[in-house]
Image (spheres, rainbow, N blue to C red):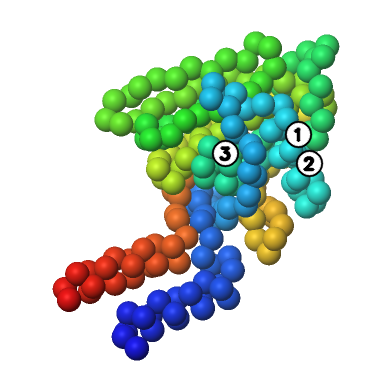
Amino acid sequence: MSKITLALLSLIACISLGGQVFADYLTISSSDGTYDMYAGDFNGLLGSSDHQFSMSDLDILAGTLNNDGIETVGQLTFILASTDAGMSFIGLFDGIPINDPIGSTPNQFLGVSATTSTNTDWFASGDSGSQTDWYDLGNGTQLVNSYLGWDHGQTSAGFAWGNVEEARSGTVSLYDIDLTEFAGEPIQFVTFQDSHWDVAGSADFSLMGQYAFSYQFVPAPGAIALLTIAGLTGKRRRRK
């Protein structure tokens, strides 16, 4: 048995036993610290072709996180998840399980400014009056500015970048325009581990009402190693 075959079998065994170690994850870096967010699955979300982060998407996100004990009301929650838009970096703002826009009057307002490469697409949702603008910054970089408003307890809002496996790094700045129903450290980064969602870290706005962070997507190392070994095997065969 060749060394490459032995290495491949060993790697497969490690992947079978490694669990979380071989999952895709995203590293958050900010003035408050560094957090690793492992990916979960939300297949069926972010299937829109017109940048719409639907209310049904908001409902499913909030309901699922709440079932795992994650409080989303009065929180700005960020997760990494596999969706119909690929691996997606998602922000759920003041999430409630049942959104009802009928008769709602926006009373919470958040600004989101996010940059990444042009290899992905954005999704945004908010009540009437919310607005999102897209800009090409050149050099393969895009900027999205969103002004999001919603009615606390009746509606929610959200923002996401899809396909982060193709646009692996970016920046996000949040602006507390008027979040009157939010307590201290309302920003939370949530990770998926041991088959459930859990809070990896939390943060608060600065005295100026701003919070900024950068992120870096890291694909599962097991998948990278498998591709590498497959490449080595291919080269070995071609030499015969």
C-alpha separation, residue under disc 2 versus residue under disc 3: 19 Å
Rendering quarter of residue 234 = bottom left
Which residue sits at x=40%, y=77%?
Answer: 8
Q: Position of residue 122 (x, y in %)?
A: 50, 29
Rendering quarter of residue 74 = top right
The answer to whether the residue labelled 2 contacts the one labelled 1, judged by CB atoms less than 8 Å apart, is yes
Residue sitting nearer the eye, 236 or 171: 236
Residue 176 placement, left or right of 108:
left
C-alpha separation, residue under disc 3 versus residue under disc 1: 16 Å
Provide the residue designation for mark 2.
63
Which residue type carries mark 1?
Asp
Which mark identifies residue 84?
Answer: 3
Provide the residue designation for mark 1.
59
Mark closer to the chain start, 3 or 1: 1
Q: How many marks?
A: 3
Q: Residues within 10 Å of mark 2 (few under 14, many from 20)?
A: some
The answer to whether the residue labelled 2 contacts the one labelled 3, judged by CB atoms less than 8 Å apart, is no
Mark closer to the chain start, 2 or 3: 2
Q: Position of residue 211 (x, y in %)?
A: 55, 35
- Whether residue 182 is visible to the viewer of this picture, yes or no, is no
